[in-house]
Image: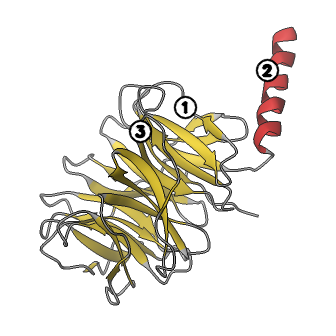
Amino acid sequence: MKRYISVIFLLVLLVSRVGATGLQLMYTTQANGQDDLYVIGIDTEQVRRATNHRAKDSHGVPSPDGRRIVFNSERVGWWKIWVADADGTHTSQLTAPTSGADYYPDWSPDGKKIVYATNTIGNGDIVVMNADGSSARNISSHPAQDNFPAWSPNGRWIAYASDRDGSWAIHVTDPAGGNTRRITGTGNAIEPSWYPDSRQIIYQSDNGGSVDLYSVMLDGTQAPKRLTASKGDEKRPAVSPDGKWIAFESNREGGSHIFIKSTDGTEVRRLTHQGYNYGPRWMPLLD
């Protein structure tokens, strides 16, 4: 009985620290000897497994309505884009089982399309397809490497990283592949993710020596702002749907773990405690 009361007391403390947010994160972990997708609640740190397959599953992204997930998987030998229900059931392969890899998928905000990167048609290109895998179209078509696409919450832009100018930088384009422009300067900038207002992008860069997180305004009115400066490497950032938290992976305490940082800078907290963990993405906040 005392143990039960202690557990309840601990959960109450966790909730009181960050508030009853209801926020959850999907991430990839090797905690059980294979790469699978898991979901963790930031209020209670309770974890559930979303996929369980002998092949590697990674970089899961929940759909805007929370009912499905899109992810990378090696189930057919090459990295391909798959979808499943949110609990990992009813899986379906979306991209063709040809040689080469498809990776880093993301949903359009209406859930009707998916953007992803591929090296099946060149060094690395950005492709948009319908959510059922049909009508895939290359929207970058550049001899350089384009990777890490992220669709803006307002649906107007797709951000991605490209080395077309000699070093990795963040670019944006409209969903048809037009109006492309570069929005970061020097330093290897990759892994863009959007703030909820679609006016600002967060990304990782080694511009300061170590790998840290930076933000930049879409309209270029402000210089990039450094958000972390730990002794470790901070990678793959994602801003929560309410704009109050940044999730990222870090080796600041050894290994690779998922952390959250309040956007006002007042709190940093580690969420995972075993295994190699990476690629956090927020579950949508649903009414």
Give coordinates of residue 247: x percent, y percent: 55, 48
Between 274 and 208, the residue placed more toward the observer is 208
* Front label number (1 vs 2): 1
- CB atoms at circles 1 and 3 under 8 Å apart? no
Q: Which residue is mark 3?
A: 36
Q: How far apart, in angstroms, are the residues tagged by discs 2 and 3?
A: 27 Å
* Front label number (2 vs 3): 2
The residue tagged with tag 1: helix, strand or loop?
loop
Mark 2 residue type: Val
Give coordinates of residue 128: x percent, y percent: 33, 76
Above or below residue 92? Residue 107 is below
Between 34 and 166, the residue placed more toward the observer is 166
Mark 3 residue type: Asp
> Which residue is depicted at the point 58% across and 37% down?
48
Left or right of 138 in this view: 33: right
Give coordinates of residue 277: x percent, y percent: 44, 36
Q: How far apart, in angstroms, are the residues tagged by discs 1 and 3?
A: 14 Å
Give coordinates of residue 68: x percent, y percent: 52, 59
Mark 1 residue type: Thr
- Mark closer to the chain start, 1 or 2: 2
The residue tagged with tag 3: helix, strand or loop?
strand
Above or below residue 222? Residue 156 is below
Q: Which residue is mark 2?
A: 7
> Which residue is depicted at the point 13% across and 65% down?
123
> Which residue is depicted at the point 33% across and 69% down?
185
- Mark closer to the chain start, 1 or 3: 3
Give me the disc on residue 8.
none
Between 169 and 96, the residue placed more toward the observer is 169
The residue tagged with tag 2: helix, strand or loop?
helix
The 10 Å Cα crowd at callout 2, few under 14, some 14 to 19, many 20 or more, is few
Q: Which residue is mark 1?
A: 272
Q: Quadrant of the C terminus?
A: bottom right
